Image (cartoon, rainbow, N blue to C red):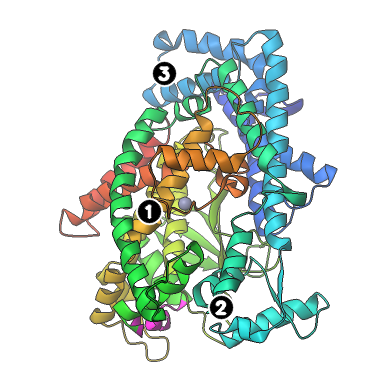
């Protein structure tokens, strides 16, 4: 029996084998703690409503999760710092291998970034800052959720709903009845209500009212996030300055691939100019189409018209066949003959369904992943369809990462959660093209979780934020390859594979109005950087004026519509993307290059390129 020693962390005792070095012991102990957070975060979104309700106990539970993000973890473990420093100072003579050296460097830097070199007075303030930021972040996110979920617009006159599908109108009527209002229609922001109205309602005034309400969420009233946004920005600035950085973005980006805010701007600004140029032409085309459609030469396109006429123009350009794509996208086929098939062709991985493992909801499907030699790689919990109480969007989390620090090899537990629309009872589960893309995307994250292995659980598979989307976005490329589509996209009634002409049409439609979309996207990414590169605390709380000044300074076209305005920019305030919304674009450069490496060989499943890619992401997981 191994001698065990005790390591204390957060006042809790962890037993680790005495033969482990101090670094490994910390890794092991830290892992026990992080594992709890991983589980809690994974389940929070999938099952509970913990982020929504501001009760004191829940708030504390959330705080416990987010402390890691806010670096309290390292502040709280500062008594370890002299030990880490002693190891770090002797690192050259310690005979460490390159992985150990990089891991040590990462841990050491985490302490420095967590305030290990601050004065005692600064450390006290740092703890306060971390706590305040965490609480305000949670409140910010809760406000967005509540403002989004509670909004309702009652429509009294059914003619205002012209253009909407019968099923959508029935849903609105049911919504109203549930709220005690008979004979009217209740339109909200969730469950696709907003998108349906913007895309299909012919009544322009209804679209305008809904658009204005949507884009002014949390700008005032009960869920006002203006002051909270500015407070978070200012507190983050104070913390970054205390730690020796010019601004918060400089602090955050130091450990990313980009390194500095300047590098991010270098990437985004030329892209933004190109997108804006294309977007202007696209908008002119869209407006000309709307003028013709309305037979009104004085018609001018407003923001609430864009989705409506885009759909009509799309139909005019690409025909209505695209609407039939869905018939070829049966969930089971997409999953087994698309997503899993690609993983098998590339990496020899197989996924077999298990029905003997307990799950947290009956919707959840469980799969065991094995490598080409039949060795287990971990478990995948797949929870794809929308249900009440589930957080919106799609995400992949690790309930547990790979580890072999404590004698025994521990395999990853990975969850994928999506909100695909639910088929009616007895109807086939057909997906939209964007749902197919999402499934490939999230599974790309899961694959990275299965393929990254190393002895140190806290660094295994933990990519820099701006590289995180490489495995997921790369995996999307295979979704639309004709060779792969022919394999999974089969008519759900006849089983016949998708016709080539439809694939070609779909691929052609993919760049439709891309310039407009990307202009908005780059504006949103640069707005994030604008907030997080301020050098002095922002005064007042006029976030609308801040946004206007920003758009003007960067010479964005007047029609630019931010994907998220400051008060409902969840990614950078409540979630963990502050100063990092650019990451999707940074990763897009990487995934485009990586996929070109495959196509360059003439074989999208080239095994040597797949091996190289696998080695590359494994090495990159420790930076
Ligand atoms: Zn992703």
Give the quarter of the figure containing the C terminus: top left
User: Residue 96 has which mark?
Assistant: 3
**Of circles 1 and 3, which is in front?**
1
Q: Quadrant of residue 255?
A: top left
Q: Residues within 10 Å of mark 1 (few under 14, many from 20)?
A: many
- Where does the N terminus fall, quadrant-wise? top right
Could one spot residue 489 in this view of the protein?
no
- Residue 302, visible in the rendered structure: yes
Relative to residue 75, is residue 87 drawn left or right? left
The residue carrying mark 2 has its beta carbon less than 8 Å from ligand 1: no
328 part of magenta stretch: yes
Secondary structure that dominates the magenta span: helix
Residue 203: numbered disc: 2
| Residue 514 image offset from top left, x and y in percent | 34, 60
> Residue 372: x and y, percent?
35, 56
- Label 2: few (<14), some (14–19) or many (≥20) C-alpha neighbours in 10 Å: some
Marks 2 and 1, the one that precedes in the sequence: 2
Disc 1 marks which residue? 518
Residue 130 shown left or right of residue 273 in the figure: right
417 or 342: nearer the eye? 417
Q: CA distance from mark 2 to mark 1?
A: 27 Å
Give me the disc on residue 374.
none
Which circle, 2 or 1, is nearer the viewer? 2
Q: Nearer the viewer, residue 408 or 352?
A: 352
- Badge 3 element: loop
The answer to which image quadrant residue 121 occupies is top right
Q: Earlier in the sequence, mark 1 or mark 3?
A: 3
Q: Nearer the viewer, residue 243 or 465?
A: 243
Regarding mark 1 in the picture, which secondary structure is present there?
A: helix
- Marks 2 and 3, Cα distance to the nearest angstrom? 69 Å
């Amino acid at each position: 029996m191994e001698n065990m020693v005790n390591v204390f962390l957060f006042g809790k005792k962890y037993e680790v084998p005495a033969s482990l070095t101090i670094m490994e012991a910390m890794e092991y102990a830290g892992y026990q703690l992080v594992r709890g957070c991983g589980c809690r975060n994974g389940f929070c979104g999938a099952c509970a409503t913990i982020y929504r309700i501001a009760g004191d106990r829940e708030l504390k539970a959330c705080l416990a999760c987010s402390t890691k993000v806010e670096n309290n973890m390292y502040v709280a473990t500062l008594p370890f710092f002299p030990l880490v420093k002693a190891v770090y100072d002797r690192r050259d003579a310690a005979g460490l291998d390159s992985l150990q050296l990089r891991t040590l460097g990462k841990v050491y830097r985490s302490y420095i970034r967590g305030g290990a070199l601050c004065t005692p007075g600064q450390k006290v303030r740092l703890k306060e800052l971390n706590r305040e930021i965490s609480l305000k972040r949670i409140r910010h996110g809760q406000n967005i959720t509540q403002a989004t979920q509670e909004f309702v617009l009652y429509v009294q006159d059914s003619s205002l709903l012209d253009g909407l599908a019968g099923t959508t109108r029935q849903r609105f009527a049911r919504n109203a009845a549930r709220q005690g209002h008979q004979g009217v229609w209740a339109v909200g922001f969730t469950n696709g209500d907003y998108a349906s109205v913007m895309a299909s309602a012919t009544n322009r005034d209804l679209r305008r009212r809904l658009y204005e309400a949507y884009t002014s969420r949390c700008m005032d009233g009960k869920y006002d996030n203006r002051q909270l946004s500015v407070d978070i920005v200012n507190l983050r600035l104070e913390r970054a300055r205390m730690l020796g950085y010019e601004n918060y973005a400089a602090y955050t980006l130091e450990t990313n691939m980009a390194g500095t805010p300047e590098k991010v701007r270098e990437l985004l600004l030329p892209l933004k100019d190109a997108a804006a140029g294309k977007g202007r032409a696209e908008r002119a085309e869209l407006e000309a189409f709307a003028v013709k459609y309305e037979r009104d030469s004085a018609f001018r396109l407003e923001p609430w018209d864009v989705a409506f006429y885009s759909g009509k123009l799309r139909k005019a350009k690409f025909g209505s066949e695209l609407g039939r794509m869905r018939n070829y996208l049966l969930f089971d086929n997409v999953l087994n003959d698309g997503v899993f098939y690609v993983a098998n062709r590339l990496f020899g991985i197989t996924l077999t369904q298990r029905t003997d493992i307990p799950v947290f909801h009956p919707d959840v499907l469980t799969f065991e992943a094995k490598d080409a030699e039949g060795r287990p790689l971990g478990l995948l919990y797949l929870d794809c369809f929308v249900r009440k109480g589930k957080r919106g969007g799609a995400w992949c989390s690790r309930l547990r990462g790979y580890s072999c620090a404590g004698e025994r090899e521990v395999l990853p537990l990975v969850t994928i959660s999506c909100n695909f629309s639910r088929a009616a009872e007895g109807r086939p589960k057909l997906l939209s093209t964007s749902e197919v893309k999402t499934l490939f995307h999230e599974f790309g994250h899961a694959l990275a979780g299965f393929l990254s292995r190393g002895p140190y659980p806290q660094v295994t598979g933990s990519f820099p934020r701006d590289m995180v989307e490489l495995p997921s976005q790369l995996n999307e490329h295979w979704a639309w390859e004709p060779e792969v589509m022919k394999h999974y996209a089969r008519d759900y009634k006849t089983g016949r594979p998708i016709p080539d002409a439809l694939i070609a049409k779909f691929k052609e439609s993919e760049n439709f109005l891309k310039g407009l979309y990307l202009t908005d996207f780059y504006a949103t990414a640069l707005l994030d950087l604008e907030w997080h590169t301020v050098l002095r605390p922002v005064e007042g709380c006029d976030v609308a004026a801040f946004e206007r000044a920003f758009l003007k300074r960067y010479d964005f076209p007047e029609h630019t519509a931010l994907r998220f305005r400051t008060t409902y920019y969840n990614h950078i305030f409540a979630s963990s993307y502050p100063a990092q919304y650019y990451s999707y674009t940074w990763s897009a450069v990487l995934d485009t290059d990586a996929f070109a490496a495959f196509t360059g060989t003439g074989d999208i499943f080239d095994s040597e390129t797949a091996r190289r890619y696998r080695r590359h992401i494994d090495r990159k997981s420790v930076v």
